[in-house]
Image (spheres, helix red, strand yellow):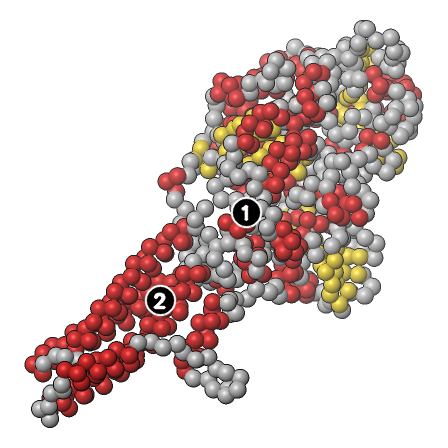
């Protein structure tokens, strides 16, 4: 694609060049005539000559000024005019020199003419021809000699010629990385090394002017892909203004029929059936939430984004059977998140394309320009954002192949349990033997969107807690002395469950039975002959429709967790319906080290209870986190709950339709990872950020939370230097750059400062004994933890 700078500059430059050359030739012809003018016309010629000289100088200077704004550079690229500038530099130098010599010669000719006229002599025809021939030979340019080693003589002409040669070979260009460049642009060296080996692997690199020289590598990696620093050629660039007439703006959208047309099921698998059902039931609440949010903040005049949504988990190739089991007790947490995401994007007014099968994805990607080209120019990409999951990401990579790099910054990965930086960077995970099939994606950790705010390293997408019952529905529902068990599958009642570390679930339920009647909602396969693990004293209502399940929650006083599933939406639904959630506390945290469920997941997170969000962000009196093997503690908590005559509902704002619209709108408006992360973050704004020195062995997540703040990874780069450490009153005895998840920070004993060498390893959760981390922390809105107070 031709650069707008070149389109703007080159026509004017060529016109000036042609005019200058024509004037130069015209002047030469005029000088020839001047030598044969009569005395009566010499005064007129003198005036004309001065005008020509003046005009020529003006045009040459104008041509020179015009070229000062060219995107200069060390090679001929599609976005530069460097070869033209070299040519004109040599030409202008030569023209100015010759103009000067011709002017001297004109004076010489004029003096001879005046002398001859004074002596009333007239040369013969032969003499005139010889004189003319001599004059023509004299003004014909001759090559300027370069300085030689033998004489060492350097003339003014030779110096001028040497400057021209320096310009031609790019001698004056800075094509080396400084130490500061390497610290700020941490990926530049690696990209340079790759270019040295692979620049001929695809012709697209040559089309951008890469010619095998170090300068061409650097300029391509700075101007096209943005991995390396901008050089002196950018100093005078006038950035073209955006054509705002082509920008589309959006308001909110309340047309559900338009959304249903987009959610057309591929084949006859009814992949979107459950999603469509949920959207239809909740649609009035979405529309009302959008209207309410518009009263709080401006949702008009937002840029309309083209968004591709690919649900890899629903594809046949995934082998997970989500589509087939969505109405048979299969896991619905992921479908809840996807349906709410689709609804959010559509209500916010953006243009959606939704796919779930690989042939649909392949058809779309085959239409993308240069989708398989490795050159990572991100100009005029056909989509602005791509939402998918890990399965979809693998499918996406398979079809874009070499062109994946240019689309990678557009990706948002719906990732229920999160991906930590140590597992995300493939080289690091492999060297530390923690690489899993889910990890090693080499994306920015914030490109992973989680169901709950697990780690600040990822982005919290969330979902909407469904509320099926309105005020009129609940008036006739009486709160019974019931405890409803959280678990729709029989294996969750197993005493030695494969997903739990504690035994004695029947004993735990027997303790609760001393105060409350136990009810359950377990899916029963009538054809199965397997023995049930559910105790006989549990009244089973079978798998319920969502609205019927909410009626049961309204009738119950307590919602009982069994330890699994982890972090589902049901506890929040129970709290929203006024049932108190009993949250099992784990005697030792559950993680990939000791729990099969987390094996292979790209996180080292340790869960202290079945539902950490309910434990940390909600708490009493809506949530009680208890040791399920401690009968005395359980009975004490139950008595405290039953003393309460009123069971009030509670709904965190971030899990409402309005809260999700607000959060996702802020992400869409401000998260832009195609503007490379090495630049200081502009969002969240600096006014929301504080910098904290953590305690020995603390992670930044812990250090920030201890100050009532949340770690903000987008601002790590800002403090990754000795200067920033000094501003925090830490004098570094020694400085080093290392690629690991513990930095920046310093050793508590020696004050040796270590900074981050690999920006993908900036981590809020990394911690190391005897090491104090330097952490960027932000404030947050209570009930909207993903956003700072200045973010809305």
For the question of whether residue 759 can be seen, the reply is yes
Quarter of the image where one finds residue 635: top right
Secondary element at image label 1: helix
State the residue at coordinates (40%, 65%).
87
Give above or below for 677 relative to 609: below
Distance (Cα) linking label 2 and label 1 = 34 Å
Give above or below for 556 relative to 297: above
Secondary element at image label 2: helix
Residue 117: % across, % down: 11, 89
Instruction: Tell which tag, 2 or 1, sits nearer the viewer.
Output: 1
Q: Residues within 10 Å of mark 1 (few under 14, many from 20)?
A: few
Residue 518: % across, % down: 83, 15
Residue 456: % across, % down: 69, 43
The residue indicated by pointer 1 is 203
Q: Front-most of 430 and 307?
A: 430
State the residue at coordinates (19%, 80%).
129
Mark sitting on residue 724: none
State the residue at coordinates (33%, 72%).
95
Give above or below for 114 relative to 542: below
Quarter of the image where one finds residue 624: top right
Quarter of the image where one finds residue 210: bottom right
Residue 499: % across, % down: 85, 27
Left or right, residue 415 beside residue 536: left
Quadrant of the frame with the C terminus? top right
For the question of whether residue 573 can be seen, the reply is no
Left or right, residue 171 beside residue 530: left
Left or right, residue 184 beside residue 623: left
Return the residue found at the far left: 40
State the residue at coordinates (74%, 16%).
329
Q: Front-most of 17 and 183?
A: 17
Pointers 2 and 1 in contact (CB under 8 A)? no
The residue indicated by pointer 2 is 64
């Amino acid at each position: 694609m031709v650069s707008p700078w070149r389109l703007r500059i080159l026509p004017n430059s060529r016109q000036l060049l042609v005019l200058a050359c024509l004037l130069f030739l015209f002047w030469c012809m005029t000088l020839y005539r001047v030598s044969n003018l009569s005395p009566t016309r010499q005064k007129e010629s003198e005036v004309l000559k001065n005008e020509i000289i003046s005009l020529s100088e003006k045009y040459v200077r104008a041509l020179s000024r015009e070229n000062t704004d060219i995107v200069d550079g060390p090679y001929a690229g599609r976005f530069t005019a460097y070869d033209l500038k070299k040519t004109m530099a040599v030409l202008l130098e030569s023209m100015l020199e010759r103009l000067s010599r011709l002017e001297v010669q004109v004076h010489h000719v004029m003096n001879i003419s005046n002398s001859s006229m004074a002596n009333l002599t007239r040369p013969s025809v032969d003499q005139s021809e010889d004189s003319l021939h001599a004059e023509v030979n004299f003004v014909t340019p001759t090559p300027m000699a370069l300085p030689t080693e033998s004489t060492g003589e350097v003339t003014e002409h030779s110096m001028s010629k040497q400057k021209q040669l320096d310009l031609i070979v790019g001698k004056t260009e800075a094509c080396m990385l400084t130490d500061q460049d390497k610290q700020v642009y941490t990926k530049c060296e690696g990209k340079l090394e790759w270019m040295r080996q692979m620049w001929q692997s695809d012709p697209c690199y040559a089309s951008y002017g890469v010619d095998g020289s170090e300068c061409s590598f650097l300029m391509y990696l700075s101007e096209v892909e943005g991995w390396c620093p901008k050089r002196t050629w950018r100093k005078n660039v006038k950035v073209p203004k955006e054509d705002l007439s082509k920008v589309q703006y959006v308001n909110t959208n309340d047309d559900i029929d338009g959304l249903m047309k987009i959610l057309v099921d591929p084949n006859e698998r009814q992949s979107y059936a459950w999603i469509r059902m949920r959207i239809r039931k909740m649609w009035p609440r979405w529309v009302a939430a959008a209207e309410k949010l518009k009263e709080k903040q401006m949702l008009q005049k937002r840029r309309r984004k083209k968004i591709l949504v690919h649900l890899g988990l629903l594809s046949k190739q995934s082998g997970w059977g989500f589509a087939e089991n969505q109405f048979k007790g299969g896991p619905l947490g992921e479908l809840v998140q996807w349906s709410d995401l689709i609804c959010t994007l559509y209500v916010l007014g953006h243009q959606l394309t939704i796919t779930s099968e690989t042939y649909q994805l392949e058809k779309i990607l085959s239409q993308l320009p240069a989708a398989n080209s490795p050159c990572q120019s991100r100009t005029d990409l056909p989509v602005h954002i791509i939402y998918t999951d890990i399965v979809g990401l693998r499918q996406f990579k398979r079809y874009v192949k070499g062109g994946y790099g240019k689309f990678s910054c557009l990706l948002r990965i719906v990732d229920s349990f999160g991906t930590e930086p140590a597992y995300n960077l493939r080289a690091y995970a492999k060297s530390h033997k923690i690489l899993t099939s889910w990890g090693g994606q080499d994306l920015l950790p914030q490109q992973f969107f989680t169901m709950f705010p697990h780690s600040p390293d990822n982005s919290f997408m969330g979902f909407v807690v469904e509320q099926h019952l309105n005020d009129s529905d609940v008036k006739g529902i009486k709160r019974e002395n019931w405890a409803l068990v959280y678990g729709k599958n029989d294996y969750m009642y197993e005493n030695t469950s494969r997903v739990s570390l504690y035994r004695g679930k029947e004993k735990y339920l027997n303790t609760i039975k001393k105060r409350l009647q136990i009810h359950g909602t377990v899916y029963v396969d009538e054809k199965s002959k397997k023995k049930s693990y559910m105790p006989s004293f549990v009244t089973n209502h079978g798998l319920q429709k969502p609205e019927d399940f909410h009626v049961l929650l309204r009738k119950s006083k307590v919602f009982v967790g069994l330890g699994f599933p982890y972090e589902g939406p049901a506890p929040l639904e129970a709290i929203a319906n006024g049932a108190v959630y009993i949250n099992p506390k784990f005697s030792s945290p559950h993680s990939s080290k000791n729990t099969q469920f987390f094996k292979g997941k790209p996180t080292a997170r340790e869960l202290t209870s079945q539902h950490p969000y309910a434990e940390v962000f909600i708490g009493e009196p809506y949530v009680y986190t208890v040791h399920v093997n401690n009968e005395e503690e359980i009975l004490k908590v139950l008595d405290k709950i039953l003393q309460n005559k009123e069971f009030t509902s509670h709904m965190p704002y971030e899990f409402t339709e309005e809260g999700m619209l607000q959060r996702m709108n802020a992400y869409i408006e401000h998260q832009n990872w195609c503007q490379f992360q090495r630049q200081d973050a502009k969002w969240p704004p600096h006014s929301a950020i504080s910098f904290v020195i953590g305690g020995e062995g603390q992670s930044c997540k812990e250090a920030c939370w201890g100050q009532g703040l949340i770690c903000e990874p987008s601002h790590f780069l800002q403090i990754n230097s000795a200067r920033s450490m000094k501003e925090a009153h830490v004098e570094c005895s020694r400085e080093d750059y290392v690629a690991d998840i513990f930095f920046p920070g310093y050793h508590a004993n020696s004050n040796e400062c270590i900074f981050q060498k690999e920006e993908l390893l900036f981590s809020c959760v990394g911690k190391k004994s005897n090491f104090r981390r330097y952490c960027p922390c932000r404030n947050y809105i209570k009930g909207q933890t993903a956003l700072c107070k200045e973010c809305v």
